[in-house]
Image (cartoon, helix red, strand yellow):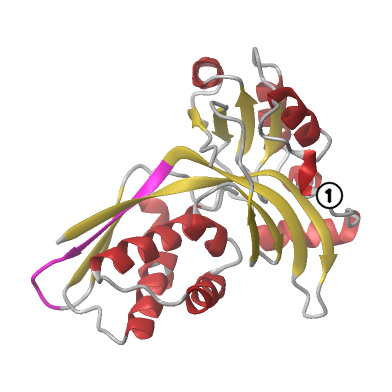
Amino acid sequence: MTVARNAPAKLNLFLHVVGRRPDGLHLLQSLVAFADIADRITAENSGGTGFQFQTTGPFATALEGEAADNLVVRAATDLAALAGRSLDGLRLTLAKNLPVASGIGGGSADAAATLRALMDLWSFRPDDQALTRLALDLGADVPVCLAARPSMMEGIGEQLTPLALPEGVGVLLVNPGVEVPTPSVFRQFARDGAFTEPLERSAFPPGNRDAWFTGLGACRNDLQQPAISLCPAIGDVLNLIGNCTGVRLHRMSGSGATCIGLFDTREMANAARQAISHACPGWWCAAGMLHHQ
């Protein structure tokens, strides 16, 4: 039996740092969305012995030598322990289509897709509390990636409120090919940034596209300026996206370096992708649509 699941890019349409816990973890508020641009996990009973994990795709080489620490392997190991079963005879294949360490939740999305695939392959479903705890132990973004629907994410990632988006929003993703370590960005924020007051969820009415974009435009990514100070190329990406025809919003996702452009249609996002790819052929560019629910 074989089960395959997509691991869609996780996008922070805004990201506010609203506080910090005594243990040092930052408290966030973020409107998280997902795009039809994705990695893909395939889980299968190989019929052999032992556990196998392999990577394919354009960014597979970036993960070489990290198999033991890969979030896919950790997710499989933790779920197997919860299910009381062995990984013997299991083969996992990760098609790595998204850039690594790029602010779009690639590793977290891969871990979440692994959990979804294995729960189906093994016909195993833990209770919601145990599954949420397992996901959060893997990483702060894994719970929202496991839900894989637009949500207001709060706390350290464990507080999720589904929040529908307008239908048909086109999205452009651009990465200049530079990895930006998340801890470094948060350290820079701690030096230069200030906490933001939490927002009301009613500021994002999905039934009124213009009002939704207005509400989103009043927000920001609190990590964007700290990331630009560490990686000026992010500012170059944002300037190019901001000059694209029809762009409604442009912003860095997560801790960078991937930046987002939102458009009224997929076609407009794809036209922008073609223009930026022509101007900067060494950058990673992809266009698609946001999942609206």
Q: Residue furthest front?
A: 207
Q: Is residue 211 left or right of residue 83?
A: right
Observer-nearest of 77 and 216: 216
Q: Position of residue 52 (x, y in %)?
A: 22, 69
Observer-nearest of 217 and 69: 217
Observer-nearest of 283 and 105: 105
Observer-nearest of 189 and 32: 32
Q: Position of residue 181 (x, y in %)?
A: 64, 57
Residue 47 in the magenta stretch? The answer is yes
**Above or below — where is 253 with respect to 130?**
above
Q: Position of residue 204 (x, y in %)?
A: 74, 38
In the rendered image, the quadrant that contains the N terminus is bottom left
SS for callout 1: loop
Q: Is residue 65 visible?
A: no
| Mark 1 neighbour density, 10 Å: few (under 14) some (14–19) many (20 or more) | few
* Residue of label 1: 199
- What's the residue at 85%, 65% (across, down)? 19
Q: Is residue 23 visible?
A: yes
Q: Position of residue 120 (x, y in %)?
A: 28, 64
- What's the residue at 79%, 34% (across, down)? 215
Going by the numbered disc 1, the residue's amino acid type is Leu
- What's the residue at 54%, 77% (across, down)? 133
Query: Where, by quadrant of the figure, is residue 77 drawn?
Result: bottom left
Q: Is residue 272 left or right of residue 87?
A: right
Q: Is residue 13 left or right of residue 199?
A: left
Q: Which residues are magenta?
A: 38-49
| SS majority, magenta | strand
